[in-house]
Structure formats: C-alpha cells, structure tokens
Image (cartoon, grey):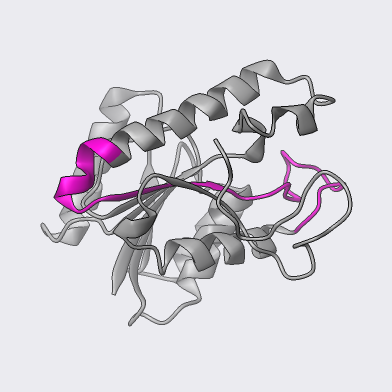
Amino acid sequence: MASYLITGASRGIGLATARTLASKPASEVSVIFAAARTQTDDLKRLVAQSPGRVHHVSMDVENKDSIQTAVATVESVLLGKGLDVLINNAGIMPSTRGGIENISTTLGSITMAPRFALFPVPAYKVSKAALNMLTVQYAQSFADQGFTFLAISPGWVKTDLGGERADITAEQSVKGLLDIIVPATQEDNGKFFNIRVPGWEQAEGLNQYDGAVVPW
C-alpha cells in the first residue's frame, strides 16, 4: 500500500491523477492527499466519494507557513508512517520519505530546443529546465537515503491550460505518468521520462509519446 500527495490537485492533470489513484484498490493505494489552495466542485465530489481515503489538503506552494501546515496535516493522518510518493504538479515542496515525481515538459529539454523553436515561451522553458536540474541535484543529494527523484513530461494535455487542440486527454496522460511512477526504482533516480501513449510512439508532428528517457 502506498500513500500519495499530489500538488495542484484542484483541476487538470492533478485532479485526474487523484481520481485515478482513488479508483485503485486500497491494497495498492492506501491514502491520497489532494493538495490545492481551494477545493473546486470536482475535488469536493472526489473527497466526498472517497471518505477517509482522499483528503483535501489546503496548501499554497508559494507560502512557507501554508506548506508547514499542510505537512502537519499529512503527518497527523499518516501517524508517523511517512509519505511514499509526492507528485509535484504545482511547484516544489520539501522532500518526503520515498519517491518524488516532478511534472516537467520536453519544452525544458535543451537538447530538444530546436524542435520547439516556434514556441516562444522562454520564461516557461527556462523554469522547466531549472526544474530538471533541481531534480538531478536532489537525486544526487538524497540517493543514499533511498529516495527516487524523477522528472516526467505529461504530454500536451486537453485541460484548461492545454486547450482542446492538445494531443491527449488527462486520463491518457495520467495513465502514462503512473506507468512510470509505480514501478520506478532507484535505478531510475534522476532521470527525465516521456510518458508512453499507445498509438503516439511514432506520431507525425512535434510530439511523440514513447516512454523514452528525454535528453537534458
């Protein structure tokens, strides 16, 4: 049984991840902490449908006091057992005891920059490149403590942010994410993965979702 905390869980990929995890048996997923500044109606429904298993944790990742309060809330539920998996879908949080998955993007790959030259969003690209380096630094710093840090590109997803013209649904993206996260071991520590979506491995155009390790 694994415990999960997902940041940015009020909508989009974060909410879809919480929903997918909640659909799994308790023998695989014991508790899900859906962290968000406020609860959307969809998140409220998910919490109500999974009493005692899905918990909304009020948290602003830009506010240190808010993060500390959220940590105390999680600790009170886990009763000292420690959190198994942290999925950073919104910003960066302090380390947990198990695996940390940072949601990145292939737009943050320096090697792949020429491919995405037609998308002039430098601030976004730089922030994701920095996230990738931070993932590597954490992977190196905490390797001897048994942590596994991953950066994962979730694809271009049909959410409020991605828009309806995007490639894949949130459900397809989440399946690809969890297919990487669940079996990950320390041999994967510090790697940057692309998700795999059946039928998209050799798709024409800019984006392919083949499950490969992404070059930095």
31 up-or-down from 5: above or below: below
Magenta residues (range): 140-168
Res 185 quadrant in image:
bottom left
Q: Quick check: 115 left or right of 129? A: right
Q: Is residue 142 magenta?
A: yes
Q: How many marks?
A: 0
Q: Residue at x 29, y 24 (%)?
A: 64
Query: Looking at the image, which is closer to me, 106 or 22?
Result: 106
Residue 48 at x, y = what percent?
A: 46, 66
146 up-or-down from 91: above or below: below
Residue 104 at x, y = what percent?
A: 55, 39
Q: Is residue 153 magenta?
A: yes
Query: Looking at the image, which is closer to me, 116 or 57?
Result: 116
Q: Quick check: 215 left or right of 164? A: left
Q: Residue at x 76, y 50 (%)?
A: 158
Residue 124 at x, y = what percent?
A: 63, 23
| Quarter of the figure that contains the C terminus | top right
Residue 73 at x, y = what percent?
A: 23, 47
| Quarter of the figure that contains the N terminus | bottom left
Q: Quick check: 204 left or right of 110? A: right
Q: Residue at x 52, y 68 (%)?
A: 179
113 up-or-down from 190: above or below: above
Query: Looking at the image, which is closer to me, 1 or 209?
Result: 209
Q: Residue at x 35, y 50 (%)?
A: 189
Query: Looking at the image, which is closer to me, 33 or 17?
Result: 17
